Structure formats: structure tokens, C-alpha cells
Image (cartoon, helix red, strand yellow):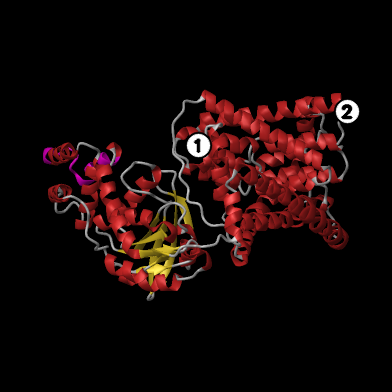
Amino acid sequence: MKKILLVGLPNVGKSTLFDRLITDKIRTGSYPGSSVGVRRGDLKIDGDDVEIIDIPGVCNLFFNEDNERVARNILIDEMPDLIIQVCDAKNLNRSLALTALLAELSIPVVIAVNMVDEAAQKGIKVKRHKLEEMLGAPVVETIASEGVGVPTLISALSRGQVPAYPSRLSATLVAAVNDLTGLIGTGACEAREKTVLAIFSLAGDHATSQWALQKSGLENDEAAGHIIKNTTQTFHRHLGLVFSRANDLWAEALYMESIYVTPVTSTPLLNRLGDMALTPVAGSVILVALIALLYFIVGKFAAGIVVDFLLNDFFGAMVAPHLKNVVAVIPYAFVRDIIVGEYGLYTMALVPVLGLLLPILTVFFFTFGFIEDSGYIPRLSILLDRTFRKIGLNGKAVLPMVLGFSCVTMATISTRVLDNKRERFIAIFLLSLGIPCSAKLSIILAILAQVSFAGFLVVFGVIFSLTVVTGFVLNKLMPVETSNFIMEIPPIRIPSLKNVLAKTSYRSLLFLQEAVPLFLISALGLFFADKIGLLTIIETLSAPIISGFLGLPPQFAESLIMGFIRGEAGVAVLKKMVDSGVMNHAQLVVAMVVTILFIPCVTNFMLIIKEQGAQKALAIIVSVTTCAIVTGGILNHFFRWANIVF
């Protein structure tokens, strides 16, 4: 089967284009020997099956970072037949520098110039035919988010060519590459692979160079070492910089010939809003307004209207009586309890998932998708960069943090985009501590909507303060590793309703696939734990902490147990307790704070072990659990002392 590698800089719409291209099930997994996620899917071209491989964005291939290392390994080990390079039409010169490197590697390429609609808003137009003529390789304009140009791109895949624009490499470098290529044994690898390995042997950092020399069999070759040493001494600086500078010149010359710019005489309202979102005062106001909007849409509309109808009118008044009549004919009380008892499958699994979680999550996903598709989140990264640096991160970490409000597990994976281990550890710690996933957050908003807006402010004020203080402390305790923050800012745009609905339906269906089996298993676990008296034992043993220190009902232990199995399952149990009236509003605020701060679900816990190792994962869990209990206890005693009831 032929293989096509999808390559591009970060944030050029590569993954969106991948989703548009494939016609079969996506296969996702980490590349062997790394933590980098690689997606694969199949596409039929002229009746033949072709595998499309999507890797994270890369800026160059000379350094030994995870993404670059995986890209190099795929180029050598899997030898793709073609590369689709996805370029950002707004910043074509940056993408063309990567094209220059691909040209030196003699790999057939098809260029997809993406986001041409956003470039047009800035007055930038790509001369597609001129660029295609200069490169000698197909160039297709696309708008991946809307599927525009995808059929044309597919038809162009059979015409991929090695970019032919004249190289800007000096004669000395070209000779060195040719000499190293000639030293590689004839049976060792193909001609194209020899060129790739020769370039990386010369221009890569130490780890990359050693990898290439070992791969080519020249690791202990004196002649190869002599060539590399002489070439390095000729330029008196790292050869990776020499290659990059030559590629930049190549790209700049190509760029100047392939675009024209029309001055934009007036700034549209959306662009003005986008500019305001980057300023400290207006940007903060917009952020607060979005948080408040999320609170009222999810907490008031979804939980107050939609959920009330489903739980009370549909499941409560319509479904439950008929189901109980049907179940009543079953002669075994044990079986009846499994189905409709206090811890039955209907009571603890189907109703919470379909009547509570699904409607709230669907509304949350739609609202979040609308914000996500508007181009606001990169602006939030810029706005919060200075603040995040106080806690040992930079604006790039805003993306995992925001993603955490969708799924903390996926956010933990996305911390791989951060530049060093220190930042990844701090980000994972803060995600585990103070970022509730969408399922937990949406129900928490629904519960807090029954209290008061003051209760909402207290809960999230405490969580926010603890997260900032924890990040500040970690930043002071851990040695500093400098990192740069560069982010492309897309224009503010009116979100595509089609895209938002597609994301919402995909995320909602994915939630159902994951949640329903776990809820059923958890409900059965609680049912049998109740029957054998295990729940009573747990509540008794935890009473000094839960009832004494935290001042909460003993049943809160069930919420914490379920929360570890599945975050939203714990909050669903808590919602049931709230509806039964066993907690007052002050207790509810304490319970919300403890629930958010408590240890993440078991899935995320296992992922933390994979990402950080068992020792660091255990340190995170112990710290987070201690923080949850201590903070909840302090709030409980303060509320009692100050007679705060909300």
C-alpha cells in the first residue's frame, strides 16, 4: 500500500485536512519509542488504497525534539511515496522554508495552500499558477475547515513532484552532501534515503547527527568524520543554521514572486474585536464576559430548562412509571433492584447519562466549539502569556489548559507541545489540581446555578487562587528552563455552524461511547458494594474526614469513589444528593471545591504515570488529594465561624 505523509508547521490546519481526506476509520497511537501521537487513515485513489499518515506540526527536522524525531523516522523507516505539505496562506514564507528542506531531500511533494479565505481577509492572494510553475510541483488552494479544494487536492496526488526551484545551498555544502552520500554502501538504502541521512549527518544537532550516522553505517567511518569536520570548520558555525539560512533565502525569493498584497483600507468590526481581545483591559473584559456567558448558557439554560424537563417530565413522569410496571412482573426482588433500585442501572447509569450529562454536555460542546472556531483561543494565549510566565509556563500552555475544560485526559496528552519537561510537569500538575473536564464542569455549573452567583464566585475564586499559587510555588522550586513562545494569530471570524455542529455531534457521540459502559459498570459496582455492606464500611471509616473535618454527609464518599472511576459519574452522584436535599448551600460550595480539586479519574491517572513516571504521578496525586481535603476543611470551618449560608 502506498503511503502519503502529511507535513506542515504547527497550526496550519493539517489535522483538519487529514479528517477531510480519509475515507475509512482513523487509527491513532503513539509512535514506537516516543510519546508523539500519529494518526493514520485510508484513502482510495483511482481504486487503489493509500495510507495517509498525520504527524504533529514541525518547523524543521534538524533538532532532536519529539515531533521532529518522529518525522525523520517515518521518512527513513517507512519511506512515504509522497508528502502533502500543508501551508498557511497568511504566512507562506514560513512554510516555504520547510518546502526548501523537502526539496533538498528529493521527496515528491504536493503543496496544499490552506486558509486562503483568511489570507484574503488580510489582502493576501497567492499566485497559485506562478508558484506551481516555479516549484514544478502541484499547488492546490484549500479551506480545510469547509472542505474547499479537497477533491482537487486528491486528484493532484498522482502528480506529485520533487520541488525543482534552484537551491541556495553553497557549493561546499552540496559537495559535502554528495561526498557523504557516496560513502554510504550501495546496498544500505535507496538513493533518496542516502541524501536524507547525509544532510542530517551534517546539519543536525548532536543527537540527530549521531542517529543519521548510525543509520547510514558511517558512525565510525573516518572519511565521513573528516568531511563533517572540514565542512564545519569552513563555516565556523553550526551547519544546521547554515542550512536554515539557505532555506530561508530560498523561501523568501519564492515568496516574493508568488504572492501579491492588496492594501486593506478599512478594518472590519470582527478584526477590531480581535485586536481588542489582545489588550489587557478589553481582553480581560471579554474573557470575563465569555465565562459569565458560559455560566448562564450551561448552568441556567441547559441545566435549568433542558435537564429539568428530561429528569422530571420525561424520565420521571413518563418513562419511570411504565418501566417500574414492566419490572414489577419480575418475580426476583434482587433483579428488580439491579434495574430500578436505588443503585440500579436505570437510576445510576441511564438517567444520569441521558437525562443529565448528555444534554448539558451537548450545550457545553456547542458553546465551546463556537468560541474555539471563532479564532479567540490563540488571542487568549497571547493575553495570558505574561501571567502564565509567573507560574512557570508561557502562552502556549493556554491551549492544554483550555482543552482541559473539554477533556483533562486529552489536555494531559496535549502538554507534549510544551518545550521542556519542567513546563510539562507544571502543566499536568495544574490540570490535575484545578481544571475540571467538560462533563464535571457542566454539572458543577448546573448545581451552582441552584445556589447563587456568590457561591459560583467563591468556588471558582478559590480554585483559581489555589491554581495560581501552586504554579507560582512550583515555578520557584523547579530550576528554570527558558522557552520561546511564538503563535500565529488567525483572524476573528464568524464560526461555521456546520463545523460547530460536526464537532458537537462527534464529541457527544464519543462521550456516549466512553461513558455508558463505565456508568453501567460503576452502577453495578455500587449496587453490589451496597448489598454486601461495603459502602457502609467506607462511609464509617471516612466519617472523621468527610463528616467531621469537611462537614459533609457520609454519602459524599460515594461521590468521591465514583469520581475516581469517571469524573462526571462522581458529580452525577453529587447532583442526586443535592436534589434529595441532604446538603445546605454552604456544604454544597465545600463539596464543589473538594470535587474539583480531588484526584483525576483513573484514566487520566494512568496517563500521568505514562507521561511523568510512577514517582512523579504519585507525588501529584498525593499533593492534589491533600490540597482538596485541607482546602475543603478550612472552608467548612470558616463558613461555620462566619455563619455564611449563601
Q: Residue furthest front?
A: 265
Name the residue tied to disc 2. 643
Q: Residue furthest left?
A: 223
Circle 1: element type = helix
Q: Which residues are magenta?
A: 208-223
Q: Position of residue 557 (x, y in %)?
A: 76, 35
Looking at the image, which is closer to me, 464 or 577? 464
Main SS class of the magenta portion in the image: helix
Q: Residue at the location (44% across, 33% down)?
A: 482
User: Residue 355 vs residue 38: left or right?
Assistant: right
Above or below for 521 versus 128: above
Q: Position of residue 328 (x, y in %)?
A: 87, 58
Circle 2: element type = loop
Q: Residue at the location (44% across, 31% down)?
A: 481
Label drawn at residue 413 = none
Q: Residue at the location (45% across, 56% down)?
A: 12
Residue 144 counted in the magenta span: no
User: Residue 42 vs residue 596: left or right?
Assistant: left
Looking at the image, which is closer to me, 124 or 299? 124
Q: Position of residue 251 (x, y in %)?
A: 31, 56
Query: Whole-Å distance between the Cαs marked 1 and 2?
Result: 41 Å
Name the residue tied to disc 1. 424
Q: Residue at the location (75% across, 55% down)?
A: 350
Looking at the image, which is closer to me, 200 or 287? 287
Q: Is residue 400 visible?
A: no
